[in-house]
Image (cartoon, helix red, strand yellow):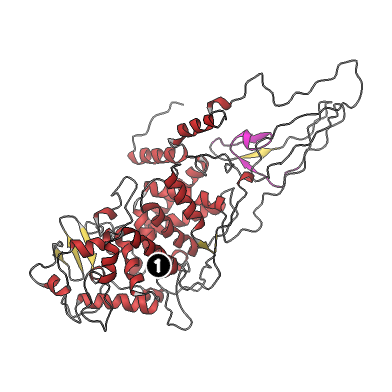
Amino acid sequence: ATYKPSNNPKMMNFSIALVTLLLPSAVSAQRQLRTERGKPSVDEKRPQPDKLTSVVERPQPDKFTSTIDFDVDVKPIKPPIGFLRPTQRPTRKIDIFRKPTQSPTPACESTCDTDEDCPPICEKQNPYAPGTCVYPGPTSSPTIAAITTDAPTTCLCASPGIVPDECELDILIDMMEMDVALNHNLFGQWTRAAFHDAGTFNQNSTPTEGGANGCLMNFPPMRLEPENNFLNDPLNHLEAIKNNWHSHPDTCIDVSSADMLQFAMFFVVVRQSNLIEPLNLGTPNVIAKRNLLKTGFAWGRPDETQCDTMWVDNLPGFSPPNDGNIAGPNGRCAAAGGEIKTKMMDRNGFTAEEATVLIGAHTIGLVRNTFGSGSFAGPWVSDGADNATPDGPVFNNKYHDFLINTIVANDASQFAAPSPGIVPFTDDFFDWFQDGVNELDHVDTDIALAFPSENLGMHPDFSVHSAAFAGNNAFFLSKFMAAMDKMGKLGVSDALQPANAPCSCSSRRRLQEDNGFGKSFISLNDALALARDLGNATSWALMQNL
């Protein structure tokens, strides 16, 4: 068949991203690093015809001894998938005339990509799908008997854990990296989804209700609530990643949807803050970020089985009741501040500083929950646009900096006056404002964080915290990480724990100790399967018009 290149730009973009993930440019750097260590490069590792791993001398015709002993130095081989690497090969005795013993029966059918994954053959019915390791049976001819070893240990996932280990997290990170590389909108949407799941918590109810419990991902009616508009597609993507992660041959896990939602937000904040780089590179910055992702998150949240759509009432509303004026003790700014205090402080249990810093998550993403993908769906700040950089939006303190330093007015009364007025905004839509020149959007609950409180009985002064965050990005990030950690535990009574470490990477396919920099922890087949499911996730969301 003749190969014809595709002219489909989406397919080309996918191909570029896929190649970048699986074969990044760090291969050349790795080759140089291996050479400096005294190891052969990738191209030099091919065995030469005159170099054999072991040599067995055949007996001469005049020698009829039935058994000949040889000391065979067998070099370690690559371990089969899911099997433990043998620590030492003993000296074997080979009987050249005895009928071979029955070949060991594998404890399970282990999958493979190439013959190198299993001794001795990887049989593939479909060249584009994983194969099965084949262990040949005995023959009747008097040939040299196969060297027998103990039967492989079981590779069945009998007891999946609710807490992954660090090797399993490497796989998850690569799967999420593959998705966000093609879909920068997921950064803001996953962040919003995590809060909309956890923010349903009400500490004043008896018993307490809502929290970081996975209802937004597991309970379809929750997605139909207006507060969760346009989150169906990113939730489908996260669910597809979760399913592929669970079914991966190198994992044995049953992680909850509650954990997936909160980890997705943690992933976004870590990846998009400070120096932004794809997480499949081998730079010191990426190594540090991957280590933080593997050690800085606590797992073990249970999924709620009795979800209630009424819990969304604990999320801050878009347009709380007011007298229609921007300023004043009962105006729009005061009512919006009261909504933050009632929902995030009184019900969720956050302090005024924690509520202010968490709303700072608006520094990335677009106001999609209200406007979908239409012309009004703009970011809060320019750095937060989906494609603000080649690697997505920037998670920093620009949101609070905009509130304090870009809005000209110093209080709600000045903001409502003809001068200076609502500058830099050009349009007032009665519960939100738009800067038509720069296509930036802010709702009333954003503006409430910019000015001192005009009704301290309704809400505290959030602007003092906004000013502190606007002046110091490192301070903002440290406070945000702490508040995010608290948010991710709302309503959770089970003990949480970090990922299990260390992990036995040497016993797993493609997770060898010599991975080096720039390599992916998922194979091409893994990536293609994930890409298929991610495409289906988006198509399903479009069919549902959500």
Is 161 included in the stretch rendered in magenta?
A: no
Name the residue at 71% across, 41% down.
87
Q: Which residue is mark 1?
A: 483
Name the residue at 42% across, 69% down.
198
Q: Which residues are magenta?
A: 105-127
Do we see residue 115 in this rendering? Answer: yes
Q: Is residue 541 above or below residue 137?
A: below
As rendered, which of 365 and 69 lies closer to the eye?
Answer: 69
Name the residue at 32% across, 45% down.
390
The total number of labels drawn is 1
**Percent x, y for residue 143?**
81, 26
**Percent x, y for residue 542?**
36, 55
Q: Is residue 220 above or below residue 527?
A: below
Is 124 included in the stretch rendered in magenta?
A: yes
**Percent x, y for residue 58?**
81, 20
Name the residue at 39% across, 29% down.
4
| Residue farthest toward the left in the current orientation of the protein | 418
Do we see residue 279 in this rendering? Answer: no
As rendered, which of 222 and 64 lies closer to the eye?
Answer: 64
Are there few (<14), some (14-19), or many (20+) residues within 10 Å of tag 1? some
As rendered, which of 348 and 220 lies closer to the eye?
Answer: 348
**Percent x, y for residue 489?**
47, 69
Q: Quadrant of residue 284?
A: top left
Residue type, numbered disc 1: Ala
As rendered, which of 195 and 528 lies closer to the eye?
Answer: 195
Is 476 positioned to the left or the right of 258 in the image? Answer: left
Q: Is residue 69 above or below residue 438?
A: above
Q: Is residue 275 above or below residue 326?
A: above
Q: Secondary structure at mark 1?
A: helix
Is 52 positioned to the left or the right of 361 in the image? Answer: right
Assign the magenta stretch its main secondary structure: loop
Q: Quadrant of residue 425?
A: bottom left
